[in-house]
Image: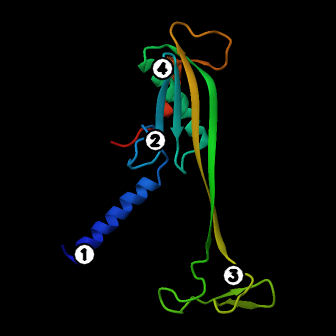
Amino acid sequence: MSMRSAAAAAILMAGVALTACATATPYQPNVPGQAVSGGFSEQRLDATHFRVTFAGNSLTSRDTVERYLLYRSAELTVDQGFDWFATVEKQVDRTSRTYVEPDPFGYGPGRFGYWRPYWRYYGAGPGWRRWDPWYGDPFWADRMDVRTIEKFEATAEIAVGKGPPPAGDRHVFDARDVLANLGPTIVRPAP
């Protein structure tokens, strides 16, 4: 394999990896090793009760996680031969991590030895100012990149039933109505 072919293959693999990382969790089963992490799972508790979970990745909004949980609850209800479901208990967990990374042009030896960039800029003070990594200018010296990443996971215990849904309870849903109303908004993984 030539050097050019190896470089092209490496670039292609990096692009595929970045594309997978840069996608919100689609409506899919939560199986380890998928291209995009997260998805739904369920557990049967007894003949008419299930625990349903949907976990999103860092690009999946809370609204999407809750909508996919509701859709999965309706889909599971119909798949099991029932007509309606009621949410007995619901919980949404938020995981938040904050990362602080120093300026990539920090002090000390780097890829190019002790060479570092040098900038001049027109400051608020008297005229031109300069930034040099060896002289800590307060404008640039403590520059940090701070990022907060959030992930949401929603869990519901549902009770399922047959026949017309009980009236007057806002926690009871007709499963086929939910499937019809939310179906067009569901994003499934690419084949």
Instruction: Find residue 19 and report its horizontal and vertical position in percent.
Output: 41, 56
Which amino acid type is marked by label 1? Arg
Secondary structure beneath label 1? helix
Instruction: Find residue 63 and report its horizontal and vertical position in percent.
Output: 60, 38
* Left or right, 168 with reference to 25: right
Q: Residue at x 62, y 9 (%)?
A: 166
Label 2 with label 3: CB-CB less than 8 Å: no
In the picture of the structure, the residue carrying the numbered disc 3 is: 140
Q: Residue at x 46, y 41 (%)?
A: 26
Which amino acid type is marked by label 2? Pro
Give above or below for 93 relative to 115: above
Which amino acid type is marked by label 3? Trp
Q: Residue at x 25, y 75 (%)?
A: 4
Give the foreground label among 3 and 4: 4
Give above or below for 115 relative to 67: below
Alpha carbon of mark 4 to alpha carbon of mark 2: how far?
A: 20 Å
Give above or below for 142 relative to 41: below
Q: Residue at x 49, y 47 (%)?
A: 24
Alpha carbon of mark 1 to alpha carbon of mark 3: how far?
A: 39 Å
Which amino acid type is marked by label 4? Thr
Alpha carbon of mark 1 to alpha carbon of mark 2: how far?
A: 35 Å
**Which mark, residue 26?**
2
* Left or right, 9 with reference to 54: left
Q: Earlier in the sequence, mark 1 or mark 3?
A: 1
In the picture of the structure, the residue carrying the numbered disc 1 is: 4
Q: Earlier in the sequence, mark 4 or mark 2?
A: 2
In the picture of the structure, the residue carrying the numbered disc 4 is: 77
Count residues near mark 3 (Cα–Cα under 10 Å), then give few for <14, some for 14-19, many for 20+.
some
Give above or below for 24 relative to 53: below
